[in-house]
Amino acid sequence: MSAGTGLARTPEPPYYAVIFTSLRNRSDPEGYAAMAQRMLDLGSRYDGFLGIESVRGADGVGITVSYWRDEAAILAWRSDPAHRQAQRGGHETWYDRFEMRVARVERAYGFARDGDR
């Protein structure tokens, strides 16, 4: 499991992926960065959290994939009051557009040159 940067270390499937694709605007970059870190810190402590991967391009398009043990864990995180506050900030200030997708991971495989997979 991982909560920081890089690739998430997930268990054997099945598990769930929440895929959040967004278009950030230029409003309040400091506030956004602080809230994003707060959400990472808080979400990674949730029972059922397995890891996260996130990237953002210079054009403002970003993809964050968080991995969860089951749908109950996703719903608990979705209902968290601090997370709901961050969602409001996204709607009101930080995002011009976003899409949320939830998927069940059935198969997973990978490669690591150093053998650390």
Image: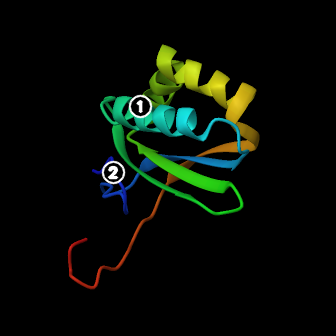
**Furthest-bottom residue in this view:** 113
**Furthest-right residue in this view:** 96
Tell me where residue 8 appears, x and y as whole percent.
35, 57
- Report the residue marked by disc 2: 4
Identify whether 6 is placed above or below 20. below
Q: Are marks 2 and 1 in contact (CB under 8 Å)?
A: no
Q: Is residue 29 left or right of residue 5?
A: right
Q: Which residue is pictured at 42% across the width and 47% down the height?
A: 15
Which quarter of the rendering shows the C terminus? Answer: bottom left
Residue 112 quadrant: bottom left
Q: Which residue is pictured at 34% across the width and 36% down the height?
A: 44
Say which label, 2 or 1, has the lower sequence index: 2
Q: Amino acid at mark 2?
A: Gly
Q: Is residue 106 left or right of residue 42?
A: right
Q: Amino acid at mark 1?
A: Arg
Tell me where residue 14 appears, x and y as whole percent.
41, 51
Tell me where residue 21 appears, x and y as whole percent.
66, 50
Say which mark, if any, is on residue 60.
none
- Report the residue marked by disc 1: 38
Relative depth, front residue between 50 and 38:
38
Relative depth, front residue between 27 and 82:
27
**Furthest-top residue in this view:** 81
Label 2 to label 1: alpha-carbon separation? 12 Å
In what element is the residue under mark 1?
helix
In what element is the residue under mark 2?
loop
Relative depth, front residue between 2 and 61:
61
Q: Which residue is pictured at 65% across the width and 45% down the height?
A: 101
Q: Is residue 87 left or right of residue 46?
A: right
Tell me where residue 33 appears, x and y as whole percent.
50, 40
Q: For label 1, count other residues whose C-alpha is less than 10 Å away and answer few (under 14), some (14-19) or many (20+).
A: some
